[in-house]
Image (cartoon, rainbow, N blue to C red):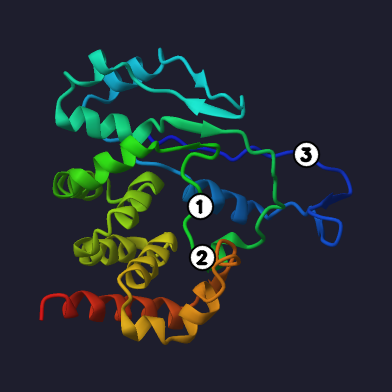
Amino acid sequence: MKKIFFLLIIIFTGHYHASAQDTLVWKEASKESRLYHSYRLEISDPPYGLKKIEGLTSKIKAVDDETGLGGKETLNQKIYLPLSFPEKFTYHMIHPESYSQNCDAMPPIQDEQKKIFAQLPDVFGEFNWSERQSKFFLANRDSVILLMRACILKDNRIGLNFKQVIVDINAKEMIPLLISIYNTNKKDHDILTMLMLLMKDNEYDQFLVSASYKKLYADSDASYKACLTFNTANEELIIKRATDFYNGLHK
C-alpha cells in the first residue's frame, strides 16, 4: 500500500505575502495538476516486515529538542538492533526520525504534470531522515541498492523515498533500470529529474556545459523551483545524455 504525504497547506484569502517586496497570488491548481502532485509524493513501502515495522513506529514517542521547533522520533535501540537487515531497511525507508516545524506555504504549482523539475520534492514534508539514517544508507549502499531494485522490479514504480535515496547514495549503476521504469508509461517525470541530478553530482562534462544545466542549476538558490518544459525533445535528450554518461562509466 502506498502512502501519500501531503505538505501542510494553509488556506489564504486574497494574497500570500512572501516578503515586503514580493507578493504571490494564491491560485488553485487544476485537477490534473493536483493529481500529479499527489502522484509525485507517493512513497514505496518495502515489504520486509512492513506490518511489524508499522506497529513499532506507531508507538514511538516524539522528543523535542531544546528549541521546541524540532526533535526526533527514534526507535529504541533495544528494539532496533535485533531487527534483520531488510527490516531495518524498511524502518529507515518509511520512518524519518527527525522533524522540524516549517510554517512556510507556497502557492500551488500550476500545470505540474507539464514540467521536469530541477529537484525532487521533499519526501516527508516537515520530517526528514536523521544523520544516522543517512549514514545507514551510505554504509550499506550495495545492500540498499539490491533491496530497492527488487522492490522497484516488483512494483514497476519508484516511490519518492527510493528516488531520494538513489540520488543521495549516488546509485548511478541504477540508470538503466530508471530509464526502463520511466519508459513503461513515461508519466513519472521525476525519474528524468533523478537522471539529471546523477549527471550533475558526478560532474558529467556533457551535461555541465548544456543549456539545461545552466537553466536548472547555475543558480543554486533558485534551483529548487527551476524546471524544464516536459516535451519529447527534452525527454529524449535527458535519456540520451544519461545513457551516454552510464556507458562512459564502463570504458
Report the amino acid beneath label 1.
Pro
21 vs 144, nearest the viewer: 21
Q: Would you call the spot at circle 2 few (<14 residues within 10 Å), some (14-19), or many (20 or more)? A: many
Left or right of 129? Residue 179 is left
Report the amino acid beneath label 2.
Phe
> Residue 115, image x and y in percent?
54, 67
Left or right of 95? Residue 177 is left
- Viewer can see residue 230: no
Say which quarter of the image contains residue 94: top left
> Residue 53, image x and y in percent?
30, 21
Quarter that holds the N terminus = top left
Q: Would you call the spot at circle 3 few (<14 residues within 10 Å), some (14-19), or many (20 or more)? A: few
Label 1–label 2 contact, CB within 8 A: yes
Sequence-first tag of 2 and 3? 3
> Residue 49, image x and y in percent?
22, 24
Task: Kindly identify which residue carries mark 3.
Answer: 11
Task: Kindly identify which residue carries mark 2.
Answer: 117
